[in-house]
Image (cartoon, coloured by chain):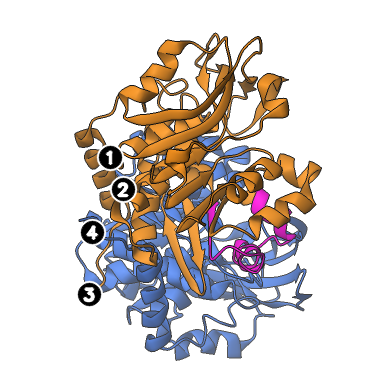
Chain colours: A orange, B blue
């Protein structure tokens, strides 16, 4: 396995102004692995589910060429469940239910065939588990990308900082970057975070796109303006999966490849929000993705004489 | 005169977390005309001041090649004065004082030599005065750009809508676009505004850049990430002045020239916020501007194979 993605594979129940779902497949590793699978065919998941998680849904990962050996199934236990309700502006949401279930004692097991991985995505999880995953790999991957959120800043800051020190790329949203750094300016925030360990920081700004910081370089990726955002759940995970999937495909880690990786990640995320859950990102063609990426090109290009 | 700019020429007193000023020169027409003067040498102002407005400050417009025949001086009266205080995030501010003074009965006089103007910028003012200005021109300019703000939506909506119907380009910030259209999605908001009359709508998003909408085309310009925003006053006016100044220079009105005009306008605005008032934009070189525009190129370019 060359790209390993650790994160939740879970159930979500989502309510937006456009409708509501029963329990559907969600979780960071679900979104991220599906997104990555469009670019790279050696993707493996490390996760835990209960025996309530349907075999057919695990099989649908396999149909995308995703290796599921790293998904532990805990018999007699239930899968992680999250229910949330989005406000009318779709930018804020309330958590209605969080049932940790199998996640409470999640101890990640790395299958032998994953040990040679070159690319590792640490999807949003407790920093302790993210860290354990790194330590359980015999060799350090060429690139470790970590996603996190404000919840861990509030509850596990020391462990979070320790884990951030071990990774190459941190993806984080703008308000979280401000919280983590104590700086309002995103430039100052990013430079403080770069001093914490990572060599690249990606600040996600939702509808306003994303900023990539590395040394003194900055890349600004636009957000694709959308008439309707149907369900924002998983957009950040999809972005991270598309990002690392593209880098795994091209292989070389440099600022220009990172620029493109952000555009591909953004393109995948723009599909994600067009339907509930993983519905849209489960059924894309290469043509869909190429066409969407061209929209980003048209959207942001200009030529100064 | 080929580019006429109507707006306030006034005094501001500004307080930010970085310091405070006494009365300094401000006003939409001051910022916009200075910005436009870097691209185009036939710029004229239509405005009104009291006899408290120093001759040396009027002369400093002339040093930039700006025609000041359209600035009426009202003897025995005082210039418009605004005092404001920015909060720590620099994104919100409180108005401390607004003394309309000469602005209360401002009746714009168009000098004969301005009558042939091809480009007209209606800086933020009451829509009634913006409209009067259009009507007092013997021929309709080739391009009319209008800037406005939420205050007129709250107090003069009918007159605002009537004026919007008469212009080619409306520049407006994101929250104002949402207020004017009643739509949260900026795509939907822009398309509603396009139905109100203008053929181009520019939505300004502050640190997140700007979006240009025209028919089904969208251009997204990045905001230049800045470590320090010293004083945001006048950034929108500077943007509008740089935008129309660049278009007056290149002459042809089309989507590609508009893209570049937005980049040049954004570059000028990025200088504006680096110092109090007009201090920074009064003293730029062509090299400064070219260098800043190159930063926008580096910031946003990517190459998809």
Q: Can you identify the residue that label 1 sits on?
A: A292
Residue A186 covered by magenta stretch:
yes
Secondary element at image label 1? helix
Q: Are marks 2 and 1 in contact (CB under 8 Å)?
A: yes
**Residue at screen point 66% across, 43% down:** A149
Residue B134 covered by magenta stretch:
no
Is label 4 on the same chain as label 3?
Answer: no
- Say left or right for A146 vs A105: left
Q: CA distance from mark 4 to mark 2?
A: 16 Å
Q: Earlier in the sequence, mark 1 or mark 3?
A: 1
Q: Where does the image place residue A217, in percent across and percent down from the top left?
A: 47, 71
Q: Can you identify the residue that label 4 sits on?
A: B256
Q: Can you identify the residue that label 2 sits on?
A: A296
Disc number lying in front (4 or 1): 1
Q: Quadrant of the C terminus of chain B?
A: bottom left
Residue A166 visible? The answer is: yes
């Amino acid at each position: 396995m060359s790209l390993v993605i650790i994160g939740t594979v879970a159930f979500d129940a989502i309510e937006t102004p456009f409708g509501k779902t029963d329990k559907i497949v969600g979780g960071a590793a679900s979104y991220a692995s599906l997104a990555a699978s469009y670019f790279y065919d050696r993707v493996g998941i490390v996760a835990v589910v209960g025996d309530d998680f349907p075999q057919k849904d695990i099989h649908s990962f396999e149909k995308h060429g995703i290796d599921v050996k790293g998904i532990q199934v805990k018999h007699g236990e239930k899968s992680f469940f999250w229910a949330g309700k989005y406000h009318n502006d779709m930018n804020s949401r309330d958590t209605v239910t969080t049932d940790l279930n199998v996640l409470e004692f999640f101890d990640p097991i790395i299958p032998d065939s994953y040990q040679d991985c070159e690319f590792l995505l640490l999807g949003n999880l407790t920093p302790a588990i993210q860290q354990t995953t790194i330590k359980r790999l015999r060799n350090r991957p060429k690139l470790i990308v970590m996603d996190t959120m404000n919840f861990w800043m509030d509850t596990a800051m020391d462990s979070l900082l320790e884990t951030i020190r071990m990774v190459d790329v941190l993806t984080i949203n703008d308000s979280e970057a401000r919280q983590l750094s104590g700086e309002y300016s995103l430039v100052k925030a990013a430079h403080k975070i770069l001093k914490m360990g990572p060599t690249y920081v990606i600040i996600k700004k939702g509808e306003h796109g994303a900023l990539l910081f590395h040394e003194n370089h900055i890349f600004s990726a636009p957000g694709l303006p959308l008439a309707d955002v149907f369900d924002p759940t998983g957009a950040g995970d999809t972005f991270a999966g598309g990002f690392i999937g593209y880098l795994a495909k091209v292989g070389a880690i440099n600022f220009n490849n990172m620029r493109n990786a952000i555009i591909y990640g953004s393109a995948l995320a723009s599909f994600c929000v067009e339907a509930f859950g993983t519905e849209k990102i489960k059924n894309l063609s290469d043509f869909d993705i190429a066409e969407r990426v061209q929209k980003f090109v048209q959207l942001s290009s200009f030529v100064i004489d």
